[in-house]
Image (cartoon, helix red, strand yellow):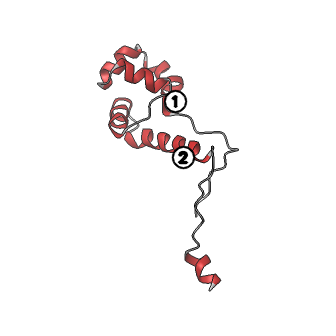
Amino acid sequence: MYRSIDIAEPHPPHPGEVLREDILPHVGLPNGEFARRLGISGHALAELLAERRSITLDLARRLGDALGQGARYWLSLQMQHDLWLAAVPAPATVKPIIWGKAHAARR
């Protein structure tokens, strides 16, 4: 079954935060060199590290190949972060649809 996102829970980190805080200090490359090896601009990397840019599929592949976690890791971080942010300002105003066993029980 699913579980709704509770905004009281600590928010998932932005992928840029993970890269900035947990990975780059151990890589041993200046940011410009790291960006060059990824094949992206220094500006694009700076935007990601400042959490002003999201992970795209292309960037996820580049990071996954370079760092060994695979693209799914980076896309998953971005998705978790985005879903949490989407739930914070205002929950969706869509009326829930009763389906499956709950629907059958109401008949």
The foreground one among 97 and 72 is: 97
Quadrant that contains the N terminus: bottom right
The residue that disc 2 covers is 83
The quarter of the displayed image where residue 85 is located: top right
Numbered circle sitting on residue 34: none
- 102 is higher (above) or lower (below) than 7: below
Q: Number of marks in the image? A: 2
Local packing at callout 1 (Cα closer than 10 Å; few below 14, some 14-19, many 20+) is some
Residue 83 placed where, x, y %? Answer: 54, 46
Judged by depth in the image, the label closer to the viewer, 2 or 1, is: 2
Instruction: Please tell me which residue is depicted at 34% across the width and 29% down the height of the picture.
Output: 66
- 17 is higher (above) or lower (below) than 56: above
Instruction: Please tell me which residue is depicted at 62% across the width and 76% down the height of the picture.
Output: 102
Left or right: where does residue 77 sit relative to residue 42? right
Instruction: Please tell me which residue is depicted at 54% across the width and 24% down the height of the picture.
Output: 21
The residue that disc 1 covers is 18
Amino acid tagged 1: Val
Amino acid tagged 2: Leu
Residue 70 placed where, x, y %? Answer: 38, 39
The foreground one among 46 and 66 is: 46
Residue 97 placed where, x, y %? Answer: 57, 70
Label 1 SS: helix
Residue 60 placed where, x, y %? Answer: 37, 36
Find the residue positioned furthest to the front.
93
Alpha-carbon distance for marks 2 and 1? 17 Å
Local packing at callout 2 (Cα closer than 10 Å; few below 14, some 14-19, many 20+) is few
Quadrant that contains the C terminus: bottom right
Instruction: Please tell me which residue is depicted at 41% across the width and 37% down the height of the picture.
Output: 69
Left or right: where does residue 2 sit relative to residue 75? right
The quarter of the displayed image where residue 68 is located: top left
